Image: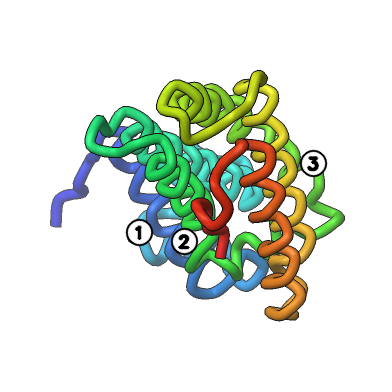
Amino acid sequence: MPRITKDPETRKNEILDAAQELFITQGFEQTAVSDIVKKVGVAQGTFYYYFKSKEEILKAVLERLIDQIVKSLTSVVYDQRLNAVQKMQGFIDGLFSFERGKESMMEYVHREQNAIVHNRLAASLIEKIIPLISQIVEEGVKEGVFDTDHPLESAEVLLFGVGYIHDSVAFSGDEEIYRQKMLATQDVVERVLGAEKGSIRLI
């Protein structure tokens, strides 16, 4: 049977797809490079042609997920059918959906010993979405549904604050503590935005 030669980018994406599925279903630590290449149906050397290690492909998987979520969030920002409050809610829902269903993989990233990987990915996400949140806040001020003189800074406070609180309790396993902290954060978000109470939902 003749060997099938594929475009390098196609092959790379196949490896990424397989790794992402295995990391999510089995967990990062339980997945070996041999599992990934077996799923794709390629030699182990092909994996190392594209990626130096399992840690490197995890980073690539997460960066690709970030690009996907940023693309999705951008579509929310420019959806003319939505007002600013609806855009902000859609934005928040989109951010939280980033980790939903990927707990086994994200739990590994959030461990203290993996802080460098986590911080780099967080910085990449923040850099890309701060301008998007700021635009929503500015629109909300113009519409009269938000009240702040500092849209960009408000966006930064929201992103860093919500992100920190979420990361600090999301993998604790205590749903009640998570719920209470997110309810408190929800109140802070509305105050920072100058939004009507009950207009923004975090849980």
Q: How far apart are marks 2 and 1 (CA)?
A: 6 Å
Q: Position of residue 20 (x, y in %)?
A: 46, 57
Q: What element carries label 1?
A: helix
**According to the image, label 1 marks what residue?**
40
For label 2, the SS is: helix
How many residues crowd mark 3 within 10 Å: few (<14), some (14–19), many (20+)?
A: few
> Height in image: 61 above or below 177?
above
**What amino acid is found at the position of numbered circle 3 in the picture?**
Ile
Residue 118 place in picture, x, y as percent: 72, 45
Q: Which residue is drawn at 69% across and 24% down?
A: 153
Dot 2 amino acid type: Ile
Quadrant housing residue 59: top right
How crowded is the residue under tag 1: few (<14 C-alpha within 10 Å), some, or many (20+)? some
Which residue is most to the right?
113
The disc label shown at residue 116, or none? 3
What type is the residue that disc 1 sits on? Val
1 vs 3, front mark? 3
Give 55 or 70, whichever is nearer the viewer: 70
Front-lying residue, 6 or 97: 97
Residue 45 in view of the camera: no
Instruction: Name the side, left or right, on which 28 lies relative to 100.
Output: right
**Residue located at (14% from left, 57% from top):** 1
Mark number for residue 36? Answer: 2
Q: Do the residues labelled 2 and 3 touch (CB within 8 Å)?
A: no
